[in-house]
């Protein structure tokens, strides 16, 4: 599984949540939570961005990848980014044997504070272990 394929799968998974929306192109509605591949875009307010990364090139653990999810909540709603992260945590942490993924575990989180538009942001980092038969290509 390539890093691109893994990123798209996570975006698709999040986009399947009620009220969440994943699109490969085009505009997002203001009422749904947008799921972005890579960086957060400026709109809509409520959104999550997905990035895959590694912690060095340790060949002892070729099946491990990390995912950083960056959340942005509604304007002037201090707890909204935390709420979005809680939805994902409940659905994803401990997920196993799905689409070539053996296990997903949250490793850390950090509150980033509000952007210039009063939208709180937060990041969560997950450890993803791919199944034994998955070829890992960066």
Image (spheres, grey):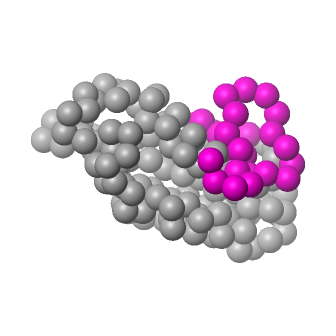
Residue found at x 69% / y 55%: 18
Quarter location, residue 22: top right
Is residue 37 inside the magenta stretch?
Answer: yes
Number of numbered discs on residues: 0
Overall secondary structure of the magenta stretch?
A: loop
12 with respect to 56 (left or right): right
* Residue located farthest toward the left when viewing the structure as drawn: 60
From the viewer's perspective, tell me whether residue 14 is left or right of residue 32. Answer: left
Question: Vertically, is 25 above or below 75?
Answer: above
Quadrant assignment for the N terminus = top left
Measuring 42% from the left and 62% from the top, which residue is drawn there? 93
Residue toward you, 119 or 31: 31
Query: Is residue 54 covered in magenta?
Result: no
Q: Quadrant of the C terminus?
A: top left
Residue 40 lies in quadrant:
top right
Relative vertical location of residue 58 with respect to residue 25 in this rendering, above or below: below
Q: Is residue 86 above or below residue 4?
A: below
Image: magenta residue range:
16-41
Q: Residue at x 39, y 57 (%)?
A: 95
Could you say where residue 109 lies in the image, as x and y percent from the top left? 49, 65
Residue 132 horizontal/vertical position (percent): 19, 39
Q: Is residue 32 left or right of residue 39?
A: right
- The percent position of residue 83, horizontal first and vertical second, equals 66, 70
- Asked if residue 27 can be seen in this view, the reply is yes
Q: Residue at x 67, y 28 (%)?
A: 24
Q: Is residue 113 visible?
A: no
Among all residues in the image, which is located at the extreme bottom?
A: 79
């Amino acid at each position: 599984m390539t890093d691109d394929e893994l990123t798209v799968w996570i975006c698709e998974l999040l986009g399947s949540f009620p009220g969440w929306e994943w699109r490969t192109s085009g505009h997002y509605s203001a009422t749904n939570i947008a799921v972005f591949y890579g960086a957060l875009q400026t709109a809509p307010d409520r959104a999550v961005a997905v990035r895959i990364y590694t912690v060095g090139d340790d060949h002892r653990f070729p099946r491990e990848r990390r995912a950083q999810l960056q959340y942005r909540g509604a304007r002037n709603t201090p707890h909204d980014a935390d709420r979005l992260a809680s939805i994902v945590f409940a659905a994803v942490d401990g997920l196993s044997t799905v689409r070539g993924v053996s296990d997903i575990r949250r490793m850390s989180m950090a509150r980033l504070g509000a952007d210039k538009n009063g939208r709180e942001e937060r990041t969560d980092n997950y450890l993803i272990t791919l199944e034994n038969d998955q070829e890992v290509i960066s």
